[in-house]
Image (tube, rainbow, N blue to C red):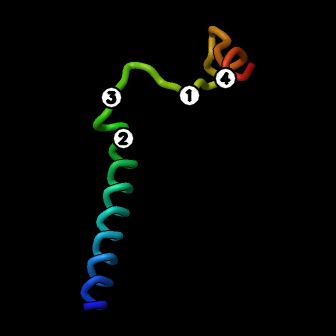
Amino acid sequence: MISLKYKFLVIAGIVIVGAVIALSFSKGIIIRQDYEIDVDPLKDPQNLFVTARV
């Protein structure tokens, strides 16, 4: 019985890790937004980078 519980925990852990990795890779594909949170300081005509750091 202990080995069965151990196998279940290992399989559940692998499934959870796989789901987390899949969601982290597909975050940009599934959730599509028209804006970005990151501001590039070199391509910033409105100086949002300076105000974001204050």
* Marked residue nearer the N-terminal end (3 or 1): 3
Between circles 1 and 4, the one closer to the viewer is 1
User: What residue is shown with label 2?
Assistant: 27
The label on residue 38 is 1
Amino acid under label 3?
Answer: Arg
For image coordinates 35% across by 70% down, the residue present is 13
Q: Secondary structure at mark 1?
A: loop
Tell me where residue 10 appears, x and y as whole percent.
Answer: 33, 77
Amino acid under label 2?
Answer: Lys
The count of marks equals: 4
Amino acid under label 4?
Answer: Leu
User: What residue is shown with label 3?
Assistant: 32
Quarter of the image where the N terminus is located:
bottom left
Between circles 4 and 2, the one closer to the viewer is 2
Tell me where residue 53 appears, x and y as whole percent.
Answer: 72, 23
Q: Secondary structure at mark 3?
A: loop
Question: Does the CB distance between marks 1 and 4 fall below 8 Å?
Answer: no
Q: Residues within 10 Å of mark 2 (few under 14, many from 20)?
A: few
Amino acid under label 1?
Answer: Asp
* Marked residue nearer the N-terminal end (3 or 2): 2
User: What residue is shown with label 4?
Assistant: 42
Q: CA distance from mark 4 to mark 2?
A: 26 Å
